[in-house]
Image (cartoon, rainbow, N blue to C red):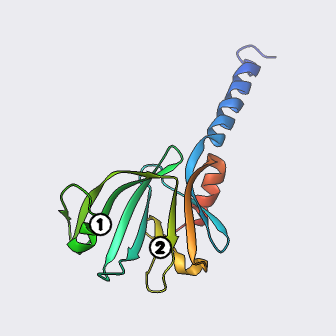
Amino acid sequence: MREGFARPNRWALIAAVLVGGAALAAPLPVLEVAGGGSRVLAVDPASGFTYEYRQSIYHVPVHEHFRLEDGRLRLVRVRSPHAAALEYFRWPGTVRSDGEWLSIDAPDVVQEELVIRVAAEGQQRLRMRAGYFVALDGIRADVVHVRAATRPLVLWLLLRVRQID
C-alpha cells in the first residue's frame, strides 16, 4: 500500500451499512383500505389525510382531517362551507371562518379504524395530499374500513411513487 492512502476502515463501512439499512427500515405511516379488495396508501407523516364527502342532510361538502398517531386515527378538525354541517357534530367549541369555508376543531377523537358506508351520491374520497385522492365509489364495496399502519421507508417510497399527481 502506498503511503498517504489509508485502507477503508472495515468497522466504519459496517456501521455505514447498518445505519443505512436501519434508515430504509424506519417505519412511516400508511392507510390500509379494505373493502372490495385492499389497498395501501402512503400518508405524509406531517399532514395526515382527509376524508371528503357530501353530507347527506344538507347536501354540502364536508372534509374531516385526520392524523395518524400511534397506529390510530386522530380526527383533528372538520371543514365545510355550511355551518349546519359542522353543528351536526354537536362538538364543544366555536365554528370559525377558515377562508371561504368554516371549521371546528375536534374534541379528543381517536379511533382504531374509520368505517365508511359508501353511498351512491356521497362523493366520498380519501385525499392523501393536494392532487391525489382515492374515490371510494371506485372501490366497489358497500363498506370501507380504513386503518392506520406503518411500512418500512423503502416500501413507503414505492407506495408514494405510485401516488404521483
* Residue nearest the viewer, comparing 52 with 121: 121
Asked if residue 47 lies left or right of residue 112, the reply is: left
**Extreme-right residue of the structure:** 1
Other-residue count near label 2 (Cα within 10 Å), few / some / many at <14 / 14–19 / ≥20: some
**Extreme-front residue of the structure:** 90
Q: Secondary structure at mark 1?
A: strand
Q: Looking at the rendered structure, which numbered label has been put on residue 79?
A: 1
Q: Is residue 113 visible?
A: yes
Asked if residue 100 lies left or right of residue 59, the reply is: left
**Extreme-bottom residue of the structure:** 121
Q: Looking at the rendered structure, which numbered label has been put on residue 125?
A: 2
Residue 39 screen position, x and y as percent: 63, 66
Above or below residue 130? Residue 31 is above
Q: Looking at the rendered structure, which numbered label has been put on residue 141?
A: none
Above or below residue 68? Residue 53 is below
**Which image quadrant for residue 85?**
bottom left
Asked if residue 55 lies left or right of residue 5, the reply is: left
Residue 126 screen position, x and y as percent: 48, 68
**Which image quadrant for residue 94?**
bottom left
Residue at horizontal 72%, vertical 26%?
Answer: 13
Q: Is residue 9 visible?
A: no
Residue at horizontal 29%, vertical 81%?
Answer: 58
